[in-house]
Image (cartoon, grey):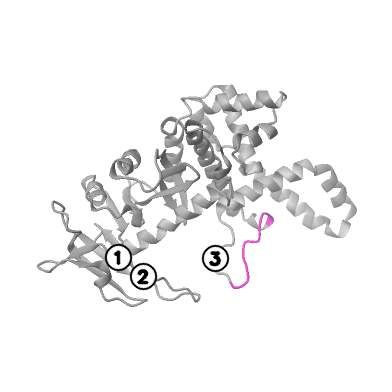
């Protein structure tokens, strides 16, 4: 079920029929975990022939009004504003993912170690993005969240000093990981590669006002270097070299660590969740399929948050695990599993009621579970 504020907004741009189709598709994504059009058409619960259902989906995915700017921007802005107040720090992760011939550049908002997609484009080439493409993705995101203290983080693909300078000119903070062979220079010193800096696991250093690369015409930025100590018998091969305009090491490292939320989000989009790589849609339809995934993913996360707030997550999954100090499942997965659990309950309700009636010594436990189902449904 879409949140109420989402439905109120979507009614401005979609007809009643189109909004119902959207709700059906989000429901199908949650239950089928599949974005392949043939699969969605096979299970779309409309009383028409399968070929007609497929054409119905293709027409819907061709709607020009089903755009990221019109449909998604107001929704993601509302979701973020409800959790990160205006004026507070907002981490924006810039990253790229690719499969087969598809190459997607995306900016996402990080919250509670997860990423919410904000804006994305399909690249018309293989490999890394360039400065112009990065600007295309970041410009609308910076404008959308101009009331927040944005910090843009990126891995080594986004090490460009051109990108760093452009972000700085927008009045935005950044933390961009650099390659170890990148050259730098302290004041009145010679250029050396970053790998020449002596550091051991568990150590960190911070340099202010350095020149990065020997390219002329760029201002000075700060450099935070962090080498994580050995943890659970795992040791990173090299330190993080973080170019930043933040003023201290701790803030820069903390911001960059949050970048990993986008990796979890890409996994949720692909084999770990909605199987986006199984789609064979055209580029235009693929952009809109990602929009549907963004709506479905945020809906599942919001539902998972509500279930956790109600204290009913134990009915959905095993919240804790021996020897593990972190939650076993995120709000996204609690929402997704919760949707499927309740859907299965309604499908088999008659059998369940027979079982509850026949097992008298467990009846009080079953009744608590039935009450939990009612509460979860009312909150959705």
In the image, which disc is placed on residue 206?
none
Could you give the CA–CA distance between mark 2 and mark 3, rounded to whole angstroms?
26 Å
Tag 2 residue: 238
In the image, which disc is placed on residue 326?
3
Q: Nearer the viewer, mark 2 or mark 3?
A: 2
Work out whether mark 2 precedes mark 3 in sequence or the reverse, and give the earlier one. 2
Q: Secondary structure at mark 3?
A: loop
Which residue is at 46% across, 37% downward?
Answer: 75
Q: Can the viewer see residue 336?
A: yes
Between residues 324 and 128, which one lies in front from this camera angle?
128
Tag 1 residue: 180
Between residues 72 and 223, which one lies in front from this camera angle?
223
Tag 2 and tag 1, C-beta contact below 8 Å: yes
Q: Position of residue 100 (x, y in %)?
A: 50, 44
Work out whether mark 1 precedes mark 3 in sequence or the reverse, and give the earlier one. 1
User: Which image quarter is the C terminus in?
Assistant: top right
Question: Residue 345 is drawn in which quadrant?
Answer: top right
The stretch in magenta equals 315-323
Work out whether mark 2 precedes mark 1 in sequence or the reverse, and give the earlier one. 1
């Amino acid at each position: 079920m879409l949140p109420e504020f989402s439905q109120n907004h979507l009614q401005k741009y979609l007809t009643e029929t189109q909004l119902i189709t959207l709700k059906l598709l989000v429901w199908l994504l949650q239950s089928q975990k599949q974005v392949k059009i043939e699969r969605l058409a096979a299970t779309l619960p409309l009383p028409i022939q399968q070929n007609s259902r497929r054409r119905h989906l293709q027409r819907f995915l061709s709607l020009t009004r089903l755009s990221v700017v019109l449909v998604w921007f107001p929704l993601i802005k509302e979701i973020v504003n409800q959790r990160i107040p205006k004026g507070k720090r907002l981490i924006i992760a810039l990253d790229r993912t690719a499969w087969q011939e598809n190459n997607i550049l995306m900016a996402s908002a990080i919250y509670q170690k997860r990423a919410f997609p904000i804006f994305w484009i399909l690249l018309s080439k293989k490999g890394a993005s360039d400065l112009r493409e990065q600007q295309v993705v970041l410009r609308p995101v910076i404008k959308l969240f101009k009331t927040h203290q944005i910090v843009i983080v990126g891995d080594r693909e986004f090490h460009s000093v051109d990108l760093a300078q452009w972000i700085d000119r927008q009045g935005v903070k950044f933390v961009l990981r650099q390659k170890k062979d990148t050259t730098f220079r302290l004041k009145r010193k010679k250029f050396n590669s970053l790998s020449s800096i002596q550091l051991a696991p568990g150590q960190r250093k911070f340099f202010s006002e350095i020149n990065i690369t020997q390219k002329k015409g760029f201002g000075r930025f700060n450099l935070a270097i962090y080498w994580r100590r050995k943890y659970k018998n795992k040791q990173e091969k090299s330190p993080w070299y973080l170019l930043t305009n933040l003023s201290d090491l701790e803030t820069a490292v903390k911001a960059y660590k949050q970048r990993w939320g986008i990796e979890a989000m890409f996994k949720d989009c692909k084999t770990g969740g909605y199987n986006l790589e199984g789609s064979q849609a055209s580029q235009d339809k693929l952009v809109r399929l990602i929009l549907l995934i963004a709506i479905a993913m945020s809906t599942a996360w919001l539902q998972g948050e509500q279930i956790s707030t109600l204290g009913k997550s134990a009915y959905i999954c095993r919240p804790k695990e021996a020897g593990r100090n972190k939650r076993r499942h995120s709000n996204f997965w609690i929402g997704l599993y919760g949707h499927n659990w309740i859907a299965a309950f309604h499908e088999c309700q008659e059998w369940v009621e027979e079982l509850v009636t026949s097992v008298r010594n467990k009846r009080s436990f079953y009744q608590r579970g039935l009450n939990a189902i009612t509460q979860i449904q009312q909150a959705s």
